Amino acid sequence: MIVLSEIEIESGMFWFDGRLNQHSDMNLSADDPALKFGASVFTTMRLYERSLEHPLTYWEGHRDRVSHSLQTFHWPQPDWLRVYTGCTQLAEHYPVLRIAVFPDGRELITGRQLPADLATQQRQGVMAWVAEGYARSLPAHKTGNYLASWLAIQQARHHGASEVILTNPAGEWLETSTGNLWGWKDGHWWTPPLSCGILPGLVRQRLMAHLKQRVKEALWSSQWTAEFEAVAYSNCVVELLPIRTIIGPKTKLEYNPTHPALAELRQLFCQTDPGS
């Protein structure tokens, strides 16, 4: 056996295989597929008011997304009541939970805090770097193989950026390392289509329903990205983050992080029923 330490664990507490652990170490066999190949399916869930039942937490959506991937991979489902119990116990300590399921149905739930500077980033926007040659494995699913995204983030930091924009071989923008892209131009919000090989994010799904006819899908060519007035990305933890600067291979693009159109996206997170 070998010991894995500090796998997205804060304060040494996590839930693994039906038990709450109060320390920061866990045991995995050296030939465990989760260790050797990143073989796991996961979702990261923000707990609003520390409750799984809050509409914005969207527990059912997170559970169903993981369940769908497990069915696709022909892996067994975990004991979902046990997963729910683990989330409930960790919700007393953390506002963000990462739920991972291994190929044999074991669950690993870890917790963390929200980014300390999240409010500032939401107000001022962030800087992103366009990464060429980094592709996520099985982009339609959230798997434990996130090496490409992790490597791209390390490179982005050398450019002073905190986020990465992944591209396809044609140079079209797909998504960030952690979320889906949104761009404002010609009176509409635009987002890349799922068919180009991006994650079907839960916030993306809800924003599409929220915006209805005011959102359109299209591939993001270099010409398109230069025409946007505002750009942002979304995920379940940060909700919505404007991107103020994007460093490309040959150009540096600037966008308005306080563009009035961003308020329309933020409305989703102010509703008691996010589906309304």
Image: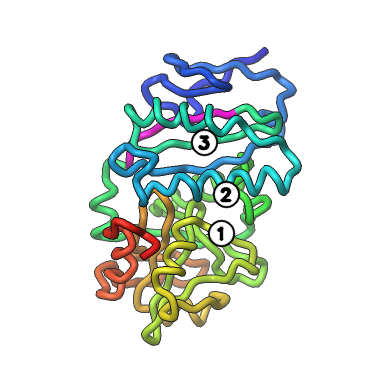
Relative vertical location of residue 97 with respect to residue 195 in this rendering, above or below? above
Residue 249 visible at all: yes
Q: Is residue 108 magenta?
A: yes
Across and down, in percent, residue 245 comes to 36, 65
Q: Residue at x 52, y 61 (%)?
A: 175
Q: Quadrant of the C terminus?
A: bottom left
Label 1 Cα neighbours within 10 Å, binned few <14 / some 14-19 / many ≥20: some
User: How far across and down, in percent of the image, does residue 132 sit?
Assistant: 59, 61
Q: Are marks 3 and 2 in contact (CB under 8 Å)?
A: no
Q: CA distance from mark 1 to mark 3?
A: 17 Å
Residue 238 place in picture, x, y as percent: 36, 51
Marks 1 and 2: CB-CB under 8 Å?
yes
What's the amino acid at mark 3?
Ile
Discs 1, 3 touching: Cβ within 8 Å: no
Between residue 256 and residue 101, name the one nearer to us: 101
Q: Secondary structure at mark 2?
A: helix
257 lies left or right of 135 = left
Question: Toward the viewer: 68 or 157?
Answer: 68
Q: Which circle, 1 or 2, is nearer the viewer?
A: 2
Query: Which residue is disc 2 drawn over?
Result: 65
Magenta-drawn stretch contains 109? yes
**Separation of residues labelled 3 and 2 (CA atoms):** 11 Å
Q: Which residue is mark 3?
A: 99
Q: Give the alpha-carbon distance from disc 1 to disc 2, as whole Å.
A: 9 Å
Magenta residue span: 107-114
Which of disc 2 and disc 1 is earlier in sequence?
2
Residue 200's disc is: 1
